[in-house]
Amino acid sequence: MSQLPIESIRSLSDTHPKPPHIRFQYGTAGFRTLGSTLDSVLFRVGVIAGLRSKKFDGQTIGVMVTASHNPEQDNGVKIVDPRGEMLEAAWEAHATTLSNAPTTNDFLEALDALVRTTKIDLSKPARVVYARDTRPSGVALVSALEDGLSAIGAEGRNAGVTTTPVLHYLVKAINTKDTPESYGEDSEDGYFQKLGSAFQSLVSGRQPLEPLLVDCANGVGALAALSLSGCLGGSLPLILENTAIQSPGALNNACGADYVKTMQRLPPSLADRLKPGQRACSLDGDADRLIYYYLDERGIFRLLDGDKIAALVAAFIVDLVKSAGLENEVKVGVVQTAYANGASTKYLSGRLPVKCVATGVKHLHHAAEHFNVGVYFEANGHGTVLFSPATQAKLAAHQPSTPAQSTALNHLMNLTRLINQTVGDALSDMLLVEAVLAHRSYTGVEWDSLYVDLPNRLVKVVVQDRNAFRTENAERRLVSPPALQAKIDELVRRYDGGRSFVRPSGTEDVVRVYAEAVVRSQADELAFRVAGLVYDVAGGDPSKRPKEFL
Ligand code: 16G
Ligand code: MG
């Protein structure tokens, strides 16, 4: 058995010391914090990714340097497993432990323990593909990562500046290259060509689409959307907005999917740009979230969030499956979280199976794998559609018995090429939405009217210890602190169509409160009153209780 290259790790690790007094955590979306504190983490992630690759017999592992929708000064890093999926949970814990080893010696000891407990054969090769978004701190962080890769002797491939979903795609494409499961050419251009050709086949013969305004959040999505638009052959005119990737501080600032969904309003920069009735969408800072919207004829902002996307797409796929003559063989299901608007759950569960899981892409992704076709979206715009391998084989083998069946089957096959199967991609999802709108001849108005959202409100509460909050039933109920859930239930009963839940955030040191009700003022009041209950039980100093918590 080979040994860890102790000396090479030691000398490079000493140039990337861990800052004292900071505790890092590989959370829901990897490590994420102030970019200036992450140097040692990136170095160590390089070493860990190398080991993870050895563990998989030299298959390529991905590393993405991004902090998504966070402000520009933040940065982060996440590891992508060989099939293009998020890192396995057990290794999230290993990554956390290794990132917190105080000294180089402690780091080496922890590495040694990891190699022994997970039985890694160090003689195997290691390959890692990595990319970053447009954050200024990314340049130095990538070079720390490269030091980590060289310390462990991993072969690195720099995919440059690209989106999170492209990096996930690359991992899968590299690992399936020249195999029967080949996922496509292993380059960004190869990916966009694949999406572009699937999209053009899907919309050919339909009415030309009106131009779509795309808010690129002043991030990497601007570059990606530009490349993608070159692969669409004019089938979808894109008007790219918020593309200032060089302007300091512009990233995600008053724009992007998170801003639009949280504020439930138009990015101010689009105020003079969007005409009533025109469709627009916002990407987030690493282009894995998508939110649509439009202004109605009175100029009022209307949101088409992840729930509306799920409703649009799931109903379309169900219809295609039926038209292809496959309704008895291919079952479509939907996965949501507690944040899904109650009206969307009602709309969907009247049509197909709907499952609710805990927040975070990996939970939705895994649940969606249990369906033949699993449509999953978080209300915040993360999501995709998974076609199980058996279903893909079934589509390929199915003999249509009428021309109509054949057309529907073709559309389904094109959807499997259009939709990113590794992780949600804002740009792939955008093409998916546009293809469905073209098929249905829907404008934003008709899409919006599939169901009417219940008014809802999200509130953050700063508490002394968010770990005191524990949930069950896919985060819809609290089991601790004791007795709090009973008080929430008591309150919710007083509101028409009321629903509320409380969960600790996985990305910020706060507790989140969600509430919805039939009337806007009631949704707001319910959210603030539940927030008040939370504050009283766990917030600390009563004199600091926010006054809006009634
Ligand atoms: C992360 C998750 C997202 C989730 C959000 C919840 C990924 C790639 N991202 O951004 O899915 O909705 O966290 O944040 O998994 P919260 O726990 O702070 O509410
Ligand atoms: Mg993101």
Image (spheres, rainbow, N blue to C red):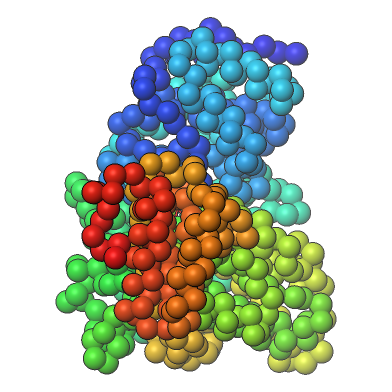
Q: Residue at x 67, y 60 (%)?
A: 367
Does residue 46 appear anywhere in the picture?
no
Nearest the eye: 416 or 503:
503
x, y percentage for residue 47? 54, 24
Front residue of 476 and 416: 476
Q: For residue 444, which quarter of the picture?
A: bottom left
Q: Position of residue 299 (x, y in %)?
A: 23, 86
Q: Residue 193 appears at what percent x and percent y?
A: 51, 62
Quarter the C terminus occupies: bottom left
Q: Is residue 306 left or right of residue 143?
A: right
In-image side of 69 versus 246 (left or right): right
Look at the image and tell me in which quarter the N terminus lies: top right
Which residue occupies the extreme left position in the image?
272
Q: Nearer the viewer, residue 346 or 486?
A: 486
Percent of width and height locating residue 549: 30, 62
302 is higher (above) or lower (below) than 427:
below
What residue is drawn where x is 66% and y is 47%? 83
Quadrant in the picture for residue 53: top right
In the image, is 375 to the left or to the right of 229? Answer: right
- Residue occupying the point 67% across, 11% down: 3
Residue 449 visible, this angle: yes
Which residue lies at the image location 34% right of the left edge and 72% below the top edge? 525
Numbered disc total: 0
Up the image or down, 285 lies above or below 467; here it is: below
